Image: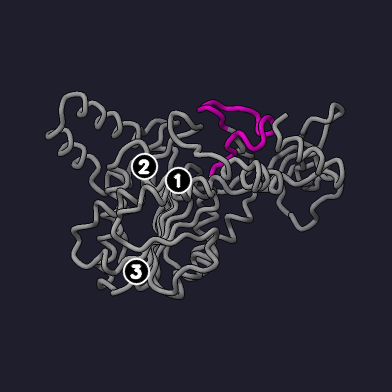
Amino acid sequence: MTPLGLDIARLIALEGPISLERYMGLALGDPRYGYYMTRDPLGAQGDFTTSPEISQMFGELIGLWCADLWLRMGQPEKLSLVELGPGRGTLMQDVLRATKNVIGLHRALSVTLVEMSPVLRETQRQTLVSCGVPVDWHEDISALPEQPTLVLANEFFDALPVRHYQRVHQHWHQRMVGLDTDNHLAFGLAAEPEHALKLEAPEGTLLEIGLIGDRIMADLSAHIARFGGAGLVIDYGHTRSGFGETLQAMKHHAFTGPLDAPGEADLTTHVNFERLAQMATAQGLIVAGSTTQARFLAGLGIVERTARLIKSAAPEQAKDVEAALVRLTDPSEKGMGSLFKVLGLRHPDMPEPAGFN
C-alpha cells in the first residue's frame, strides 16, 4: 500500500468509511502525499498528456479565440485572463505568444492561474517568466480580479472529486471507501439511505454527482455575470446527464484500480457538460455548445493552420504536425476529437464566440 493509502486506512480505522468525494480529495490533494501536490504528472515521464502538450496549434487557436472576443467586446482597457488547472503553463504560453501582436491586448491583460500544486506552480513560473504580462496565482477562484474576465478550463473539471450513489432496495445509498477483512481499501455502501435523492432507477443503478464542480461553475458564472466576459470548458465527458459512473485511475499511461495506488495515480471522471451548462444558465449566462473538440478546432481554423505549418516545415517536422492534427481531431469514438467536448459560456452583452457556429 502507498504511504497515503496507509494514512487513509488509519483514518478509516479511526473514523469509519469515508465518501468517495473525500477519498478523491485526499488522493489528489493531500499536502504531503497527494498526487497533484508532489509531482509533474504530464508527458511521457508522467501519467497522461493534454492537448497543449501535443501541439502548439491548440494553444495558438485558443489565444486567437481570446483576442477575437476582446476585439469584438470593445477592447476594454482591463481584461483578466484566468486559467484553471494550467498544467505546466504550456497553454497560457502559447496563448500569449499567439496574441502578442494584437495591438493593445497585452497592455490590457492580467493573467490569473488557479493552481493548487506547488510543483506545477514552480513549473508555470519558469514557463511564463518572460511572457510580458503580469501573472498571479491563486489556489481557488474566490478572489478573481473584479473586471471583465475570460476563463479557460482545459482538463480541469475531470479531476474534481465526485460522489457515487447506488440504488438498493428502492433507495439510494452513498458509495463509501472502507476496509476489507485484510485491511485493504475497498468500496462499500453507507448503511443509511439518502432520502433527498428521489430519482427512479432500476435496482443496482449507479449515479455520479459532481457537487464540487457544480459549485465552481456556479461561482465562475456568477463572476462573469457580474463583471462581464466569457469562458471555455474543454474536457472529456458527455453532453447528457444519465446514470452510471465513470471513475478511472491512470498510472504511467495505463489504467489501474481507483483504490490501488492513492497519491500515485491520477483519478478522473467524465465531465457532465449538461450539468455545467445548467449551472451557467442559472446565473444568467448564455451557453454555446457543447460541441466536439474536432468541430471546435476546425471552426477556429486548425486545418488551415496545419497546412501553413507543413508548407514551411522540414519533412520530419511536417509529419509531426500532421500527426498532431490527427491526434487532436480524431473523430473516432475514443479519439480526442470526439471524446473531448467544448462548452462556451458568455455574458448576455458579449458577442457570440468563435468556434460554435
Q: Mainly helix, strand or loop, the magenta region?
A: loop
Q: Amino acid at mark 2?
A: Pro
Q: Nearer the viewer, residue 121 or 227?
A: 121
Residue that carries the numbered disc 2 in the rendered image: 52
Q: Residues within 10 Å of mark 3 (few under 14, many from 20)?
A: many
Identify the residue at horizontal 31%, vertical 38% (top origin): 55
Cβ–Cβ below 8 Å for labels 2 and 1? yes
Residue under numbered circle 3: 79
Label for residue 264? none
Q: Earlier in the sequence, mark 2 or mark 3?
A: 2
- In the image, residue 304 lies at what x, y percent? 18, 41
Going by the numbered disc 1, the residue's amino acid type is Gly
Quadrant in which residue 167 is drawn = top right
The residue pinned by badge 1 equals 87
At x 53% / y 67%, what residue is drawn? 282
Q: Secondary structure at mark 2?
A: helix
